[in-house]
Image (cartoon, helix red, strand yellow):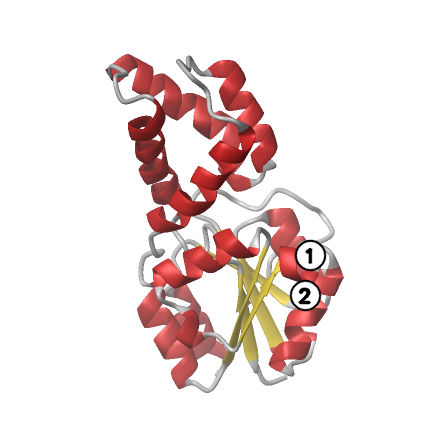
């Protein structure tokens, strides 16, 4: 069947979240640990990344872990920290390599493009605005606004309805094995796993349609079929 639409995850798919985290930690240190030495800063980096779990741990839990494990002189309240995170983190976002050429190419083929992302509207909209990618997308579905999160099939169906596409006419590109790949596959969407590190070993029953290590590989996959 003809491909009509491609839906993307946002973090670690369109955004280079790893680089963004490094940038955010620098802001965190400048704000709350301005007099820390190099060893202390390395500890802050380590503790933050352990708590953050690449964005998949609840931000309130991250805050509680940071308060417990870092040596604060005057720790912020939860509200203060979360406000700082929601305002500062989107400003740290950087595009994944080759994101703009890939999006331009896919749009030139007449494909409808969408985003499904878990998170708050404030933070995820801030990232999209910082990246400057909104013009490429026909629909953007954010879990807070949708009321459901990946891998719930309802969030995938909402995106398909907005794109006026059937699951069999759609690819989903994402980095998270369960939320993105298994979630999309269970809806009948062809999932493409974008991983910078690993080999698929998450499920015997469900495997990605294709695996890519760079976004530009999408162009070659599309050319093979169309």
Q: What secondary structure is found at the residue carrying circle 2?
A: helix
Q: Which mark is residue 96?
A: none
Say which of 184 and 51 sits in front: 51
| Visible residue check, residue 168 | no
Say which of 218 and 91 sits in front: 91
Q: Residues within 10 Å of mark 1 (few under 14, many from 20)?
A: many
Would you name the residue on which mark 2 appears? 156
Residue at left offset 42%, top offset 77%: 106
Tell me: 212 left or right of 151. left
Residue at left offset 33%, top offset 29%: 31
Instruction: Give the x, y percent position of residue 127.
Output: 42, 56
Instruction: Give the x, y percent position of residue 156.
Output: 68, 65
Would you name the residue on which mark 1 appears? 183
Q: Is residue 149 above or below residue 224?
A: above
Q: What secondary structure is found at the residue carrying circle 1?
A: helix
Say which of 117 and 27 sits in front: 27
Residue at left offset 69%, top offset 70%: 158
Say which of 119 and 196 sits in front: 119
Q: Is residue 78 above or below residue 176?
A: above
The image quadrant that residue 99 belongs to is bottom left
**Which quarter shows the N terminus?**
bottom right
**Along the polypeptide, which appears first: circle 1 or circle 2?**
2
Tell me: 3 left or right of 31. right
Tell me: 60 left or right of 134. right
Instruction: Give the x, y percent position of residue 186.
Output: 74, 61
Residue at left offset 48%, top offset 33%: 81
């Amino acid at each position: 069947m003809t491909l009509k639409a491609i839906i993307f995850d946002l973090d670690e798919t369109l955004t280079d979240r790893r680089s963004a985290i490094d940038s955010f930690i620098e802001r965190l240190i400048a704000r709350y640990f301005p007099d820390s030495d190099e060893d202390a800063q390395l500890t802050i980096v380590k503790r933050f990344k352990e708590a953050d779990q690449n964005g998949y741990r609840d931000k309130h839990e991250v805050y509680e872990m940071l308060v417990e494990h870092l040596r604060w002189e005057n720790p912020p309240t939860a509200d203060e920290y979360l406000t700082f995170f929601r305002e500062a983190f989107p400003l740290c976002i950087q595009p994944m390599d080759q994101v703009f050429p890939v999006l331009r190419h896919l749009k030139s083929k007449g494909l409808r493009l969408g985003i499904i992302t878990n998170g708050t509207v404030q933070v995820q909209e801030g990232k999209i605005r910082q990246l400057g990618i909104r013009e490429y997308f026909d629909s953007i579905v954010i879990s807070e606004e949708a009321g459901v999160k990946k891998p719930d099939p309802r969030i995938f169906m909402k995106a398909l309805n907005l794109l006026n596409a059937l699951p069999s006419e759609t690819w989903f590109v994402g980095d998270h094995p369960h939320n993105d790949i298994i979630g999309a596959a269970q809806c009948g969407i062809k999932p493409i796993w974008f991983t910078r590190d690993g080999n698929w070993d998450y499920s015997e029953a469900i495997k990605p349609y294709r695996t890519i290590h760079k976004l530009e590989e999408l162009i070659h996959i599309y050319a093979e079929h169309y």
